[in-house]
Image: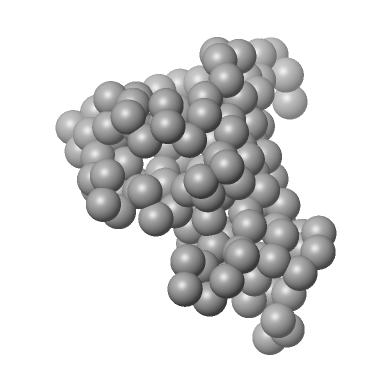
Amino acid sequence: MTHESDDVNEAIRGELSLLDPAVRSSRVRYQRLFDPEFVEVGTSGRRYTYDEMMAELPDHAGSTAEGPRYDPSAITGVVLAPGLVHLTFETIFDGRRSRRSSIWRKQDEATGWRMYYHQGTPVPPDMP
């Protein structure tokens, strides 16, 4: 396995962790997966900052064991530069499909890989 494959796999592990309700509901667990400069454009079109995400993630859909869960598929990644990985994938959540894109950044060994940017785009039901 190449170093680049290791980096992509680490970013994928982080991404999948952030889709897990047990992680999403625990600030101690999810905080270490977000870069302090994190920004998201959600499927609603809303822009989230790091501080907003830290305060609101447990209240977002998909953050409870009893509710609907994200079902990810077709996750692929590419190393853009040392310490920078771009992931693309799709999710189905509560019957709605979205295409997603994340950039993961690793600034040092101590902090590891963290999500720097995320965007979700809803896919209309009639679109392949």
Q: Where residue 27 appears, x then y in whole percent? A: 27, 44
Q: Where residue 89 appears, x then y in whole percent? A: 64, 43
Q: Quadrant of residue 93?
A: top left
Q: Quadrant of residue 53?
A: top left
Left-right relation of 67 to 50: left
Residue 7 visible in the snapshot: yes
Q: Residue at x 18, y 32 (%)?
A: 66
Q: Where residue 65 appears, x then y in whole percent? A: 20, 38
**Quarter of the N terminus within the rendering:** bottom right
Q: Nearer the viewer, residue 53 or 65?
A: 53
Total numbered labels placed on residues in the image: 0
Left-right relation of 46 to 70: right
Q: Where residue 101 appears, x then y in whole percent? A: 67, 40
- In this figure, which colouring scheme has been used for the structure? one colour
Left-right relation of 77 to 60: right
**Quarter of the C terminus within the rendering:** top right
Q: Residue at x 56, y 40 (%)?
A: 38
Q: Nearer the viewer, residue 106 or 18?
A: 106
Residue 95, above or below 102: above
Q: Residue at x 53, y 55 (%)?
A: 114
* Residue closest to the far right: 80
* Residue closest to the far left: 66
Residue 34, above or below 59: below
Q: Residue at x 61, y 24 (%)?
A: 41
Residue 58, above or below 107: above
